[in-house]
Image (cartoon, rainbow, N blue to C red):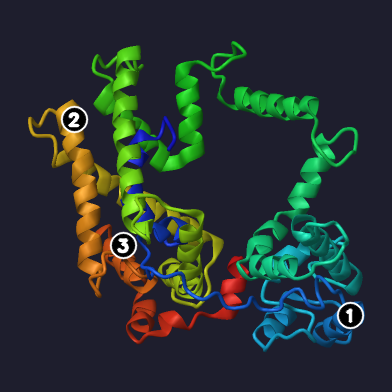
Amino acid sequence: MSYRNIGASSLTLLAMVVSMALVSSLSAATKAKKKTPKVKPAPKLCLGAIDPFDQGTQKTGFFTIAGKDGELTSDEFYTASEKEMSTKTFLRSFDTFRAMKAFDKDKNSTIDWVEAAAYRADLRKRVLAEFDANKDSRLKGPEREAANRALAAGKFSKLRGMAGRQEAFMKKYDKDGDGKLSDEERKAIGEGYRKRAIEKYDKNGDGKLSDEERKAMRRGRGGAWQAATERWRMQHFDLDADGVLSEAEEADQKEFQGQFVTMGKKMDVKFNDLNGDGKVSREERQSIGREWAKSAIPMMALAATYMDADGDGTVSPAERDGFGKKIQTGMIKWMEDFGNEFDSDKNGRLDKKERTAFVAGIEKNFTARVDRFDADKDGRLSPPETIEMIKGFAKEIDITPSEAKMKALKEGDIRKPDKKTDRKQQ
């Protein structure tokens, strides 16, 4: 929890409920059985594409979907991705066109075989680097099983989209070309960030950032939410209203932050301690993660349903940005309204006693929501139960799908996402 984001931290539990993308954060409210479920074998995603690598099959599969010109377009990619994938095809479930475009050397927005082969080679290299424990350039037994699970979970899909940017970043800062960053090179990166920050926010031109200029920088980076949390912070802790927190005021804020840390740990144990031993083990978190992995598609579909403002079946960058701003606006209003309920003397500021009541109120509010949506009354929320809680809270802060999407939602189409749309978002 960030020291400066105390306003945001005051709503951490509820903010994670409304955010359609934070599946991992919502796993704290996941229902899981007391016994560890039997683990199913991971899909054979490595076979043919990673290790063992079958270049002939991969090349034939590529030209099958790339057409006569041998150039794979985005439309050809999405058409092929909607068909059944197997070890005899080029595309796998972890592939995205955006990731391949990082290897589009001629910048023509299509992928030829040479570029596709470079993409595959890069992926193979990264998977082997992480899972080839004995460094024999092969994946066997547990190594391959772990790699299959990582690919199925989308771990390398997330990294692939950044491949081009990572390459450019290293080219810029890795001056000696050894493939890693030395202390001096890291220092140069930090100096570069510092220089750009000063150029942008040093309004008085003294070559450094004052407290006010640093505040402006934080506001610029965090948008409306950061500005609101900074305002909340000063409102409730800057007792002498001089615009700067004194040592004593900073101590009050830190104590308040500690209350949320304590509450967070308590809630973590409450929802994730599956065997009742008072702590959350790595195995328990993995079990919960597997439970949530099964609901990844419904969650993505739910997010797209709310983001797709015009109901045309696709989510544009503008719609995604607009959705984020709407969440910020709704959460800011909710935060201010909820906080006002604990301002017993109505002086516009929460004192120490009122802040303690506020923390307890957050915990009570969240617990009540869990109880309300815990359909089977087992004390935890399953992924479907959590999705219902998300929808309920979203409605509270005036976030609803478009009319067209509302109809689809009521008819149950939320569990049948548009694969083409989902892949475009990756």
Numbered disc 2: secondary structure: loop
Residue sitting nearer the eye, 202 or 260: 260
Residue carrying label 3: 394
Label 3 neighbour load within 10 Å: few <14, some 14-19, many 20+: many
Q: Earlier in the sequence, mark 2 or mark 1?
A: 1
Looking at the rendered structure, the kind of residue marked 1 is Lys
Q: Quadrant of residue 131?
A: bottom right
Q: Quadrant of residue 368?
A: bottom left
Q: Earlier in the sequence, mark 2 or mark 3?
A: 2
Q: Examine the rendered structure and indicate whether residue 16 appears above or below residue 419.
A: above
Residue for point 80% across, 85% down: 65
**The C terminus appears in which quarter of the rendering?**
bottom right
Q: CA distance from mark 2 to mark 3?
A: 26 Å
Question: What label sits on residue 350 in the rendered view?
Answer: 2
Q: Quadrant of residue 153?
A: bottom right
Residue carrying label 1: 59
Q: Position of residue 168 (x, y in %)?
A: 80, 46
Q: CA distance from mark 2 to mark 1?
A: 66 Å
Q: Examine the rendered structure and indicate whether residue 412 appears above or below residue 424.
A: below
Q: Position of residue 250 (x, y in %)?
A: 34, 20
Q: Position of residue 196 (x, y in %)?
A: 66, 28
- Can you see residue 11? no
Judged by depth in the image, the label closer to the viewer, 2 or 3, is 2
Residue that sits furthest to the left in the current view:
345
Residue for point 86% across, 74% down: 53
